[in-house]
Amino acid sequence: MTHQFPVRVYYEDTDLAGIVYYANYLKFIERARSEWLRGIGVDQVAMKAEGVVFAVRRIEADYLSPARFDDLLAVASRVHSMTPARVVMDQRVTRAGAALFVARVTLVAIGAGGRPVRLPRALAAGLG
């Protein structure tokens, strides 16, 4: 299952040359993951109240081509693999179908003590 999330590039996302600042791609893919979770019924506020949050453990990213001010982008997110306490996702930022940025992101569920815990049931069910 692939989730699509639209992103408009605003002036604040760019550097002096009008090109998206590299770190902002990480914000774009973070927003896409949050919307994907919301879409499959995972309530991150409720999770946090129960002492469970997601943390990025690892990210591998390739910047392929620049995005510019006012571009309409799409972030595609899909699960690459999953274990009881980890999700590895592939995410791709495109403009008109052309890849600009690709990343593989490893997320872990952690408890109040900062130790890995099992993924929430709603997430596992949403992926199954």
Image (cartoon, rainbow, N blue to C red):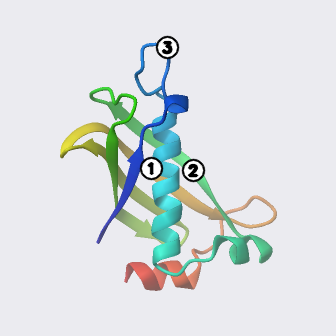
Tell me, yes or no, if residue 106 can be seen here: yes
Q: Position of residue 76 (x, y in %)?
A: 32, 56
Asked where in the image residue 9 lies, by quadrant, the reply is: top left
Instruction: Tell me: residue 7, above or below residue 41.
Output: above
Asked whether the viewer can see residue 23, the reply is: no
Q: CB atoms at circles 2 and 1 under 8 Å apart? A: yes
Q: Earlier in the sequence, mark 3 or mark 2?
A: 3
Picture quarter with the C terminus? bottom left
* Mark 2 and mark 1: Cα distance apart in space: 7 Å
Mark 3 residue element: loop
- Of residue 16 and residue 65, the one placed in the foreground of this image is 16
Q: Residue at x 51, y 32 (%)?
A: 13
Q: Which mark is nearer the camera, 3 or 2?
A: 3
Q: Position of residue 6 (x, y in %)?
A: 37, 54
Q: Amino acid at mark 3?
A: Leu
Category of crowding for the residue at label 1, using alpha-carbon neighbours closer than 10 angstroms: few (below 14), some (14–19), many (at least 20)? many
Q: Position of residue 57 (x, y in %)?
A: 56, 49
Judging by the rendered image, the residue that carries numbered circle 3 is 16
Residue to which mark 2 is pinned? 56
**Residue under pointer 1:** 105
Residue 42 vs residue 98: left or right?
Answer: right
Question: Distance of mark 3 from mark 2, alpha carbons?
Answer: 29 Å
Given residues 85 and 3, the one toward you in this image is: 3
Q: Is residue 18 above or below residue 123?
A: above
How many dots with numbers? 3
